[in-house]
Amino acid sequence: MTPFLRLWLITLVIKAALAVWLPFSSDEAYYWVWGWHPQLSYYDHPPFVAWLFWLGHKVDFTAQASRLPAVFLGHCTLLIWNRLLSPHLSDRARRWWLAFVSLSPFLGIGSLVVTPDLPLVFFWSLGLLAFRHAIDAKTATAYAALGAALGLGFCAKYHMVLFVPSALAWIAVSGGWRELPYRHIPLAVASGLVFCAPVWYWNLTHDWVSFRFQLEHGFKSGAWRAAWPLQYAAGQIALIFPPVLWLATRRREPRELRWLHAFAWLPLLFFLYTSFKARVEANWPIIAYPAILALAFLNDPGRRWIRATMAVWATAILLVLSHLIAPWFPIDAKNLKTSEMSKYDALLPAFDEFQPLFASSYQMAATLSYKRKEMVYKLHGMNRRDFYDFHPMSRPRSGVFYVAVEGGHPLPGWLAAQKAETRDVRAASPELRIVEVRIAEEEQRAQDSGD
């Protein structure tokens, strides 16, 4: 076993242990629920994260063990980058690079949080390996493999589409278009469509709602704010880290790796552009981070800045882990991400008294489902549209039911249309209350006959 592979296995074991120990976030609980309802795709996202959790349920022997298949897939991303960079790094340098990325926010401790980003980054990286092989080999098999990687990446997250303009930008700038075997490109396209067919078929049979939702989510906003581009830029500088960002722009990497710039900067610039139209989540440009980290490492041969960055990241990780073990941050616990999974604990006793009980948001429904280890459904039409609105169990089947309401969230409009009567029956906490809903008998009969 090589020293690099030994270090890779050690870091995998550490990640697996932390993944089983770290509490879920509410979004992870949501995808965990998806794993119990495997589909070809979903309203919010493509299906790969659900497929990983479906597999994770097979090994869900304790705590958060259902994360393990996804964490293993994410850690394999580092093997792909080792393959991409190994011709240009010594054995010792490759071990330093592995330690460097293992401490980075999103590819390190962030890769323990199972979201669609994790399989996206894996297939984006696999696509880069296939892209380089296709450019060099120029064979039909290589182009079919490239299409397969991109298609599977599209099954992870729609952001995979940015791979194509990034690749085209590099081909145009480098002059590689002169040597492209154009006869193989239709094969790559066909292969990509085959491997992302589940997403297209699901959208075709659901009026393209997922595509429309994501386009509106990323490009439209009811009230634009001038601060969004500034927040995006500041957030990316903080997440990537200033020394890393500076090193990545130095352009001292081997000439054979100049293609990394297209896959590093184009996604960042794209989301900067969309930040002028809608709010951009901090993790959306994650596909750019592996290439940026690679460029930074290559452009600091003395490793002085890399070592300093690793020390900062390692310190931050230790501080966060110590707070999880024994909270000591001088911050209200309610304002921390770690409070998500205890936020709805006050509702758990209500299930013994109020049935059927529906949640008012997907976060509440997913968190309660994970805590109870049985499905809790969001009330159809309440809060924003999500996976639960497509599930028949989100629609009440009785004339009397209960809803756990958070804050001032209004009940869905269809209840008024059915002449429903509502009353508060219990305050579970200052922010949570149980509401009883009664639908007139004739309206209930009309609903049942319509179903």
Image (tube, rainbow, N blue to C red):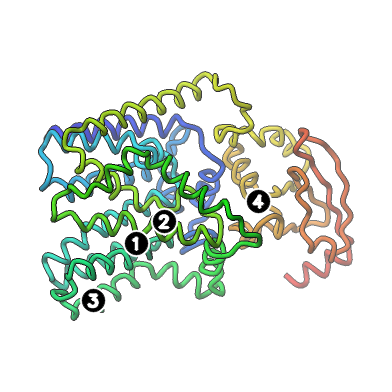
Between label 2 and label 3, give the one nearer the viewer.
3
Amino acid carrying mark 1 in the image? Leu
Amino acid carrying mark 2 in the image? Phe
Residue at the spot 51% in from the left edge and 44% down from the top edge: 28
Q: Which mark is residue 377?
A: 4
Between label 3 and label 1, give the one nearer the viewer.
3
Q: Earlier in the sequence, mark 3 or mark 1?
A: 1
Label 2 neighbourhood size at 10 Å, few (<14), some (14-19), many (20+)? many
Whether residue 144 appears in this view of the structure is no
Taking depth in this image into account, of 442 and 94 the one nearest to the observer is 94
Q: Residue furthest bottom?
A: 183
Label 4 neighbourhood size at 10 Å, few (<14), some (14-19), many (20+)? many
Q: Which mark is residue 48?
A: 2
Residue at the spot 19% in from the left edge and 43% down from the top edge: 298
Question: In this figure, which residue is indicated by the disc labeled 1?
Answer: 152
Residue at the spot 76% in from the left edge and 33% down from the top edge: 429
Quadrant assignment, res 448: bottom right
Q: Earlier in the sequence, mark 4 or mark 1?
A: 1
CA gap, disc 4 and disc 2: 22 Å
Query: Helix, strand or loop at disc 2?
Result: helix
Q: Are marks 4 and 1 in contact (CB under 8 Å)?
A: no
Residue 157 vs 74, above or below: the answer is: below
Classify the position of the N terminus by image quarter.
top left
Label 1 neighbourhood size at 10 Å, few (<14), some (14-19), many (20+)? many
Quadrant assignment, res 113: top left
Amino acid carrying mark 3 in the image? Ile
Residue 94 vs 41, above or below: the answer is: above
x, y percent for residue 76? 27, 45
Residue at the spot 79% in from the left edge and 64% down from the top edge: 414
Q: Are marks 4 and 3 in contact (CB under 8 Å)?
A: no
CA gap, disc 4 and disc 3: 45 Å
Residue 242 vs 386, above or below: the answer is: above
